[in-house]
Image (spheres, helix red, strand yellow):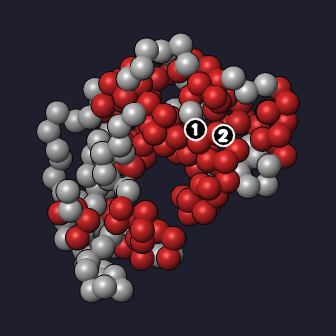
Amino acid sequence: MNDPAGETPLGPDGLPRCPWALSAPDYLAYHDEEWGRPVHGDDALFERLCLEAFQSGLSWITILRRRPGFRAAFSGFRIADVAAFTDADRERLLADTGIIRNRAKVDATLANARVLAEWKPGELDTLIWSHAPAKPGPAPRTLADVPAVTKESTALAKTLKKQGLRFVGPTTAYALMQACGLVNDHLTDCAARKTP
């Protein structure tokens, strides 16, 4: 995924895109329509947080391709519904081939939902967005210019952990920030960078 020459490749429509967006067909729509666009709402942010945690140690394409399975298995990532899952639901999840059946990640998702179910509506949204950088950094010219961790993602991870959430390290927090539009890491020449 490195682009050392600083060239932004052209997509099938002739528009320049981040190189990773063209590495697999599944990435193109995600790149153009979702990644880096602002996401609000507790359930929507809970979904992204969970998916980023499940991605840890895996490629994002694996998660993206299983996203419909994740949504079905976790009741659309509605926090209140997931918080009410029983031991039988946990066993169902651990047997579900439509998701990543990692015991620690499944347990973290259920535990995180139970923590978040106690929060006031909008509290997760407010907390996550309060860690957006005060001003945008320079647009990355190449993938080598995109960080894996920032001081903001480290602070977000610490805050989430302090609140009792699991599987939320600084790298996962930064991936969440990228995916949900808290930062814009589309490359300088990428057409999606200029799209509102």
Tell me the quarter of the image containing the C terminus.
Answer: bottom left
Tell me the quarter of the image containing the N terminus.
Answer: bottom left
Q: Quadrant of residue 45?
A: top left
Quote the CA–CA distance across marks 1 and 2: 5 Å
Q: How many marks?
A: 2
Q: Secondary structure at mark 2?
A: loop
Q: Residues within 10 Å of mark 2 (few under 14, many from 20)?
A: many
Q: Residues within 10 Å of mark 1 (few under 14, many from 20)?
A: many
Q: Quadrant of residue 68?
A: bottom right
**Taking the image as drawn, is residue 95 in sight?**
yes
Residue at horizontal 30 percent and vertical 31 percent from the top? 129
Residue 139 picture location, percent across and down = 18, 57
Residue at horizontal 47 percent and vertical 68 percent from the top? 27
Three-letter code for the amino acid on which mark 2 is drawn:
Phe
**Taking the image as drawn, is residue 53 in sight?**
no
Residue 79 picture location, percent across and down = 56, 28
Which residue is under mark 2? 74
Residue 160 picture location, percent across and down = 46, 23
Residue at horizontal 63 percent and vertical 28 percent from the top? 81
Residue at horizontal 71 percent and vertical 50 percent from the top? 100
Residue 154 picture location, percent across and down = 38, 31
Q: Are marks 1 and 2 in contact (CB under 8 Å)?
A: yes
- Work out whether 35 lies above or below 53: below
Left or right position of 82 against 136: right
Left or right position of 59 against 194: right
- Asked whether 78 or 156 is in front, the reply is 78
Q: Secondary structure at mark 1?
A: helix
Residue 139 marker: none
Three-letter code for the amino acid on which mark 1 is drawn:
Phe
Which residue is under mark 1? 77
